[in-house]
Amino acid sequence: MDRVLQHPLLRKYLPLVHEDLGVIYSRDLIKWLIIAPIIGVTAGLAITAIAVIILGKMWPAVMAYYLGHHWAIVPSLVVGFAITGLIMQYLTPDPDEHSTEEIIRSYHEHQGDIDMRPFFPKLLAAVTTVGFGGSAALEGPSIYGGAAIGSWLWTKLGRLRLDSRDRRIMLICGAAAGMSAVFRAPLTGIVFALEMPYRDDLAHEALVPSLIASVVSFVTMSSFLGGTPLFNFAGGSSYTGKDIVWCALLGVIIGLIAMAFVVTFRRARTFFVKNGLPHWLKLAIGGFLTGLCGILFLHLYHGTLMPIGPNYEAVGEILGKHHSSGELLIFSALKLAATLFTLAVGGVSAMFVPLFLTGGAIGTAFAQSVVHSPALGLYAAVGMASFISAGYKTPLAAVVFVAEATGGHAFIIPALIGAAVAYAVSGDASASGDQRLHEGVKIQELGDIFVREVMQPQMISVQASLTLREFASTLSPHHRHEVFPVFEDQELLGTVALWSIAQVPVDKWSTTTVREITEMEPQTISPECDVMEALRLLAQEHQQPMLLVLSEEGRLEGMVTKSDILQALTIRRDPAPGANLKIEPFDPISAS
């Protein structure tokens, strides 16, 4: 065996194999192959239990009672919402922090840390909100429940040497698993969770772990409740160029409606949060107004369709039965109103399904009255994707959700066009007030980083006695500096910039020395200063693009630029396992 290991070929190539494997597994994929399935199974079981309680037991009985006793809708919703308010007011530290909003805020501001003490009260409040007929569905408690489980598991898996960045990833993993399970749509869970924190960006770091957790969660849920599409409906497989144009117009209309609704919702939410009424009373008022929406619609149109409750059955009603365009539009208006009254006052859930359903109703009415097309499924699918895209700023998740949850894969292209148009028309208006435009730099993190941690200890220096032609001949395409320190023997004289050389006529380069164009008062900074001060100096008007780092003895130790600061901040925020910033002594590479 030893003779084999000492073979010249093995001794030559084994280090190369080791190096290649190190690069391949540099992202700790093995770690996520352990963690992500645990999150997927745990979240899948929890969401299955919630779905069985609300959709299997509670809502069918409540809905049947409401349809048979219209008078009971308002008092039942008032009582149910008041119970929700009491739970949130007395059993949680902040009754206005819950559901998707809490997850987004935790991702951005708390490194994925979720307070687990009110976990069960918040899930119970979601059950009373949705189960009694609030205009919301299961995505709120599912996303919250899955994400909270991911955050909690971070505290239990300490042996895997997890850092704060891993906790944010596990938070998104759990949210993806929750979304995947509740809608039986694993790809939707992945895409929505990655899009959720931002209006114009993705949480790229959580892609692979979320993929694993979503698939495992879906399999877990399917083993209990089956894996067929949640809102399966039959639709044609063809569409024309004219349909594409109509779909784009539908995207414009829904984008404008969604923008108006989202702005109204955000203002109403702000009003109720700031209002001094007891939380349970706010919810009771919301329950009263939500109930009025249900009674009004049932008074106008007798049937089983009504704009309250989780409304999973309403998808089949709209897509499988004929309803006049007027009925569909009134249903859409009252559904949006009921959603506003349910969630703006503090109801515990989210509006993914209400927006999805409203878009489907509007799309169907548009097909019947404007396009006069028999392809109702096509326009319903486009309307669904468009409203989710505009309301939640998740265009990719909207299209994927329509394809997975409805089985309408043939409509992906029209749905994508409608979603993109609606997204653009609605601007930055989002149902989530905590979404950020894109991943941003946390400036407050710069205060505890020192210049010596981020500076470049190696740089190119030049002797003042060189002519410009001699200096230019020594420059290499690999030199990325725009400014170079100038030395008189061993003494720092100043700096010279490349643009200063360019201002000297070429025929004078042989007689002009570097000293003649040297800036004698370069901007300097101490290695013990914090990076906030360095950034302030670099941001001043008419400043050079770099600072020279000088020790107390006046010795040049390196240089620092804005790019160095941003790169170091990225390393500090998302450190590689075992990575530490190592500072080497300044080693000037002379251009002479």
Image (cartoon, grey):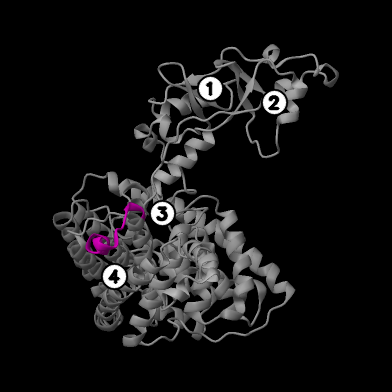
- What residue does disc 4 label? 130
- Image position, residue 64 (x, y; %): 28, 83
- Which circle, 4 or 2, is nearer the viewer? 2
- What residue does disc 2 label? 498
- Element type at marker 2? helix
Q: Considering only order in the chain, which callout, 2 or 4, is on the residue closer to the N terminus?
A: 4
Inspect this view and state whether residue 281 appears. yes
546 versus 254 height, above or below:
above
The span from disc 4 to disc 3 (Cα, nearest Å) is 19 Å
- Image position, residue 63 (x, y; %): 29, 80
287 versus 466 height, above or below:
below
Q: Considering only order in the chain, which callout, 3 or 4, is on the residue closer to the N terminus?
A: 4
* Foreground pick, 460 / 332: 460
Q: Is residue 19 left or right of residue 171?
A: right
- What residue does disc 1 label? 540
Inspect this view and state whether residue 376 appears. no
Q: Which residue in the rendered view is the most extreme toward the left? A: 90
Q: Considering only order in the chain, which callout, 3 or 1, is on the residue closer to the N terminus?
A: 3
Q: Is residue 51 magenta?
A: no
Q: Amino acid at mark 3?
A: Ser
Q: Amino acid at mark 4?
A: Val
* Foreground pick, 126 / 157: 157
Q: Residue at x 60, y 68 (%)?
A: 416
CB under 8 Å between discs 2 and 1:
no
* Foreground pick, 229 / 17: 17
Q: Considering only order in the chain, which callout, 1 or 4, is on the residue closer to the N terminus?
A: 4
- Element type at marker 3? loop
- Which circle, 2 or 3, is nearer the viewer? 2
